[in-house]
Each structure stands twice: as C-alpha cells, then as structure tokens.
Amino acid sequence: MTLAELLEIEAERVLATYARLPVEFVRGEGSRLWDADGNEYLDLLCGISVTSLGHCHPRVVAAVREQVGTLMHASNLFYTAPSMELSRRLSELSLGGRVFLCNSGTEANEAAIKLARRARREGEIVVVLGAFHGRTLGALSATPQESKQAPFGPLVPGFRAVAPVAEAVAAAVHEGTAAVMLEPIQGEGGVRVLDDEVLLAARSACDQYGAALIFDEIQTGMGRTGTMWAYEQTPVVPDAITSAKALGGGLPIGALVTGERLADAFAPGDHGSTFAGGPVVARAALEALDVTADDDLLAGVGERGALLAAGLERLPHVLEVRGRGLMLACELDVDAPALVRDALLRQRLVLNATGPSTMRLLPALTIEPAQIEDALGRLAALLGSA
Ligand code: PLP
C-alpha cells in the first residue's frame, strides 16, 4: 500500500483524532527507523517515550515470541505467573506496596484516582496547571487544559486545579482531599520540572490531612530521567506512582504501584480490566524492567542527557533547554511544529513539538553518543538555515 493510499483511508475511514506527519514507518531497530521506501531515520522520540530501550529490544522480542505461542490470555479470574512476577518486581523496584496492572497510562491514572477516592470517600483530587494525565473522562478531568477539556463537559466533579507553586498546592489541601496528583516533570506540558518546594509542600499537606500523594511517572519513569523513577531524584516519596509508556518495552501496559498507605484500599470487585496484565505484555514488561534496572544503563542516561543538552544549548534559535536525563525540551524562537516536520522530512530525524515554540526530545536510553552528535549535526543544519 502506498502512502497516498494510507492518507486516503484515513481521510475516509478514520476518526480524526490525530494530526499525523506523512511518513509510514515499517521497521525499527535500536534508535533507527525505516520508512516504506527504505529510508533510514534517527529516532529521538521513541514513540513518545515508549521504546526507551530502542526498537525491538532483543530480550523483549524473545520473551514475547515465546509467550505468544504458549498462552496469550487467560483473564484475571485465574492466575498467570507473568502478571504476579511483574507485580512483585514493580513493587520491589519502587514503593514496596501493591500493584494494579492495566493497559495504558490513562488507565493507570484512572485506577489511581479511584484508589484515592476509595481511601477517602468523595474526596477531592488536587492537580496542577500544565498537567497532562490522559484523555478518558476521569484522567481528562485531572488535566486542566481548556482546549482538551472544554469540548467534553460535563467533566467528573471533585477536581481542583492550582498553580504549580508551593503555597497554592499547600492551600488547596484540606480534610476533604483524597489526593494530590502530579507529574514530577510535566511532559506534555513542555518538560517542566516541578520545583522541590512544590513537591515538599504537597508531601507535607498530604501528611497533615491524610491525603495521598500520587506521582504520574508515565513519562518520567522507567529510567527516562536517569533513575528508575523520577521521584528518586526529589526530596519526597509519593504514596503511589503510575507507570505506562516504556513499561512494556514497546507493548501496551500500565501499572499503578502503591506504597504502604494505599496498599489495602481496594477490595475485590472495586476495579478491573479484561486484558490487564495479560501474559504477553507482562513478559515484555518483566524484560523491560530487568534491562532498565541496571546501574550502568541508568548512569549512562545522565551522561548522554548531559551531552545532548550541552549540544542543544549551542544550537542557533535555542533560547532554553529544560529537563532531566533524556527527557529534554528546547524553547525556540522559531516555529517548533514546522521545525519538527522539516526535521522528519528533510533530515530524517524523529522529534516532537509540545507547543508552538517547544521541541521535545525523548531518545532511547541506549542512544549512542555518536548518534547524539549525528542528531545535533542534523539539527544544526536545519536551524542554521531557519
Ligand atoms: N500521563 C502522562 C504524564 C503522560 O505523558 C501520558 C501520555 O502522554 C498519559 C498520562 C496518558 O497515557 P496513555 O496515552 O498511555 O493513555
């Protein structure tokens, strides 16, 4: 099928939810992608932080291949070892409590919201401006962005959005608060690192009023910032984290992981999902977790991130570089979506824009220093002529 045919099908048959760029990818390996004409691209986006171990990581592929021919699905009415092992491993590698597996980031946040409400009936959920927690109605209600929320009202009641500043977060929490939910680094919001003061204020307000502190680590987790979870580089420990994106090594899976405080809030029947924690995705996630939880790999994220950030800072039209590890964004004085399009079509470089002037980079944690230099060269060529 040609690209023109794909565009035609989209125009006639596909609900118009995505603004796609005109490239059809057919194969990936490590930080490289190939289109249908055999052209090679350098991937600095990883399917929005999903293929963080590179495309088709051999250990993930081998585990999936084996599992897919053995047992694909049994349902959560029964036991399957991969789902139990994955829950144990996720808990051991983070907050030490209990795990709910699901199929996406949005679902993980839905589970977190329900868990917090289960622990405090009818409790309010405090979120911060600039947040992105997903697009189903609960997660959307936790995503205080006018353009995303306005067409879909009425939203779920009981969400309060405040500025991401310490005083505002502290003042919003009271006896009726079920949770404060935030991303330690806002991803879709343009890679904005929340100040430690905000996190400390949220932690102490939650402690004072018995509310839960939930970190959405869907984009920041799985080694993206140089530690397994971003909270490890902050002065606080949350009561729960949500994970998805890179968790499945490229396959769709999400998880809610609790610490002690929320571990016993759900009872049988409170929540569930038919596909959740199925053997194939759970095996993929077990491999992804094992590969990622490696001190050398995580240390390399910091080094590669520093190399990339330093190179970005030297480029023309770059006003600011933000982020941590390999979760980076550049503020530009040129049109970011146009640059991203040009990067793809003229330089075969895969990037993303989170706003009119913000370019986001989420390369594989395994990207080679030479590939970083190569990417910087391609960006310099584009920005030099911008
Ligand atoms: N939370 C954060 C921080 C995200 O970045 C995203 C996706 O971009 C989501 C939630 C939603 O995840 P999903 O698209 O898997 O539903």
Image (spheres, helix red, strand yellow):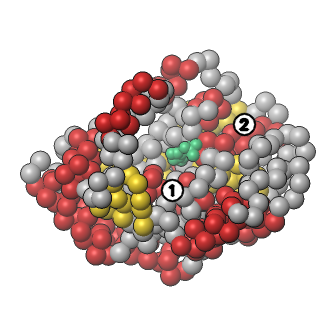
Is 142 positioned to the left or the right of 70 in the image? Answer: left
Q: Is residue 336 above or below residue 303?
A: above
Q: Mark 1 — residue?
A: 50
Residue closest to the far bottom: 296
Helix, strand or loop at disc 1?
Answer: loop
Given residues 142 and 343, the one toward you in this image is 343
**Cα separation between marks 1 and 2:** 32 Å
Quarter holding residue 311: bottom left
Who comes first in sequence, dot 1 or dot 2? 1
Whether residue 238 is visible to the viewer of this picture, yes or no, is no
Quarter holding residue 170: top right
Amino acid identity at mark 2 = Thr
Mark count: 2
Other-residue count near label 2 (Cα within 10 Å), few / some / many at <14 / 14–19 / ≥20: many
Question: Residue at left 63%, top 66%?
Answer: 65
Is label 2's Cβ within 8 Å of ligand 1?
no
Given residues 344 and 183, the one toward you in this image is 344
Residue closest to the far left: 385
Helix, strand or loop at disc 2?
Answer: strand
Whether residue 219 is visible to the viewer of this picture, yes or no, is yes
Is label 1's Cβ within 8 Å of ligand 1?
no
Q: Is residue 55 above or below residue 293?
A: above
Question: Residue at left 29%, top 69%?
Answer: 372
Q: Measuring from the top left, give residue 120's x and y in whole percent.
A: 81, 38
Other-residue count near label 1 (Cα within 10 Å), few / some / many at <14 / 14–19 / ≥20: many
Q: Is residue 59 above or below residue 380?
A: below
Is 235 positioned to the left or the right of 280 in the image? Answer: left
On-image quarter of the N terminus = top left
Question: Residue at left 79%, top 30%?
Answer: 122
Quarter holding residue 156: top right
Q: Mark 2 — residue?
A: 177
Q: Measuring from the top left, give residue 264's x and y in whole percent.
A: 87, 52
